[in-house]
Amino acid sequence: MTYKDLDSITDPLEAIRSLFAEMSSVKEDLSATKSKISNLNRNNTKLIVENKKLQAKVDSLTTENERLKAEIEELGGPRVEKNSSNSSIPPTKQSIKQQILQHTTSLREPSEKKPGGQDGHEGHSLDKCSTPEHTKEHKVKVCPHCGCIIPEDSEQTCFKTVQVIDITGPLQPCSTTEHKYYTTVCPHCHKSVKATSVTGNCKKVMYGPVLQTMVVYLYTVQSIPYNRIAEIMRDIYMVEKFSEGTVRNILEKNKSKATPVYDSILSFIEKSSAAGMDETGTYINNKLCWFWCLQCPKYCYVFADESRGIQALENHNIIPHLEDLILYTDRHSTYFKLKVRGHQVCLVHLLRNLQYLCDLNKEQHWASDVQKLLREAIHQHNLRPPGEIDVGGFKKRMHTLLEQDLSSFERKDGNDFQAMQNGLINCEEYIFTFLEHPEVPHHNNSSEATIRILKVKTKVSGGFRTNEGADEFAAFHSIAETAKRNGISKFKALFKLVADMAPGEDFIEKLIAEND
Ligand SMILES: [Zn+2]
């Protein structure tokens, strides 16, 4: 009902009743609104107080900030971490991480291109020289079809010449040898026969084995980067126009040739009864990767992988070669997931870890007692033949030490002793393996030494630019290191490899036999 039109009121009493009802509802609304407003007022007051406090805090912080800025200014300006790019700190004094960052961070925009000449670019092919120092004639002596001996005076025609350029010595010009290949018709079976090639499928000019070996050797054994190898070739051995791209080509070509030799090493290691393993981090294309090593006294196999876990061993098909081996390693968990004949944990590592505990808490004897026990076992091993050592006694004494409660030795909030004890409990059965197997060493020093070269490589050139580069390094390093373990110089082994037109799986055996 509306009362705008007073004339419409017919029943005044009813109208008053209705007005009263409306008034009381408005009163209720009003009191609710009033209470809301007073609530809001209270809140507002609170916020104003808070805001004032905050304003005061901002003021005080601003003042403090200005004071600190002035102080920094007084102390010689803002601090930036110093490195060789912004101070006189030499690059070698920086952390390896910083060194790599700097090695691999360039002001130049990164390019997707591989080093050296690009695909499709003709490059400068080597030119034939008109006056080669040496000439070597390759005539047909025996017919490969019927076995008949070709008479020396039979007419033969030269069908191909290949020149081989090789280094001769420091500051000595390169020498060129021209190989002349002949063909003739067999007087017996009348088939056309050709002399065997000693220059592969090269059609014109190639670099000789000494030069190629030098490149492989400098890259692998001395860890020298591509550009500096090229410089050595130009400056010391007077090889004209020798580029990074040529270094890359030589490595690539020889790596594919070396693959059967590299692969064959695994089958030699497989047959020895024990082998050491270790892994070390390096950078491939700025990514942290791992170089793994599997080695025994006479053979060594290294490979690179992105994984530090079992995946790496699967990727390189290593696992089937390990089944009959006792592995000596550090305590990296991957090794203990493998199905092998047995394990030996590296006692040198354990002794070092225990030494930390000795230094940490000089009041306790537990750590030094474990050290004493390990040292005694090593001493006995050096002194007596394996059958005469009381291995059970050693194991029992170790077990007693591993049952001891070490909680009172811990630092406040520390668990170093507990962690070490748990670690030892986990490998308890692999501590004294070497006492029962004379072929197993009590340490893993040789594996560590084998991959230490990667630390040099990382320092010198910040790691590898490509996976191919890392794989080449791994293959050549494995072959060179295996040669060294058999008393053969690394350079000589690499030379034999490069000079061999098609080295096969028996390459290593032949190399060792030749040297005996
Ligand atoms: Zn014939």
Image: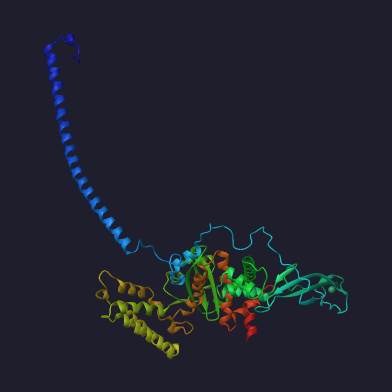
Report whether residue 163 is seen.
Answer: yes
Q: Looking at the picture, tell me which residue is in the foreground, 199 or 510.
A: 199
User: Is residue 22 left or right of 173 when viewed as pictured?
Assistant: left
Q: Looking at the picture, tell me which residue is in the foreground, 444 or 239.
A: 239
Q: Position of residue 363 (x, y in %)?
A: 25, 80
Residue lying at the far front in this picture: please name it. 74
Q: Position of residue 179 (x, y in %)?
A: 77, 74
- Which image quadrant: the N terminus? top left
Q: Position of residue 455 (x, y in %)?
A: 49, 72
In the displayed structure, 65 sits above or below 27; it is: below
Residue lying at the far left in this picture: please name it. 13
Q: Looking at the picture, tell me which residue is in the foreground, 188 or 49.
A: 49
In the displayed structure, 346 sits above or below 458; it is: below
- Which image quadrant: the C terminus? bottom right
Judged from the image, the quadrant occupied by ligand 1 is bottom right
Give the image quarter of residue 267: bottom right
**Which residue is drawn at the image coordinates 67% and 59% (left, top)?**
121
Q: Looking at the picture, tell me which residue is in the foreground, 15 or 309.
A: 15
**Which residue is drawn at the image coordinates 36% and 73% (left, top)?**
423
How many numbered marks does the figure carry?
A: 0
Report whether residue 508 is seen.
Answer: no
Q: Position of residue 357 (x, y in %)?
A: 32, 77
Give the image quarter of residue 362: bottom left
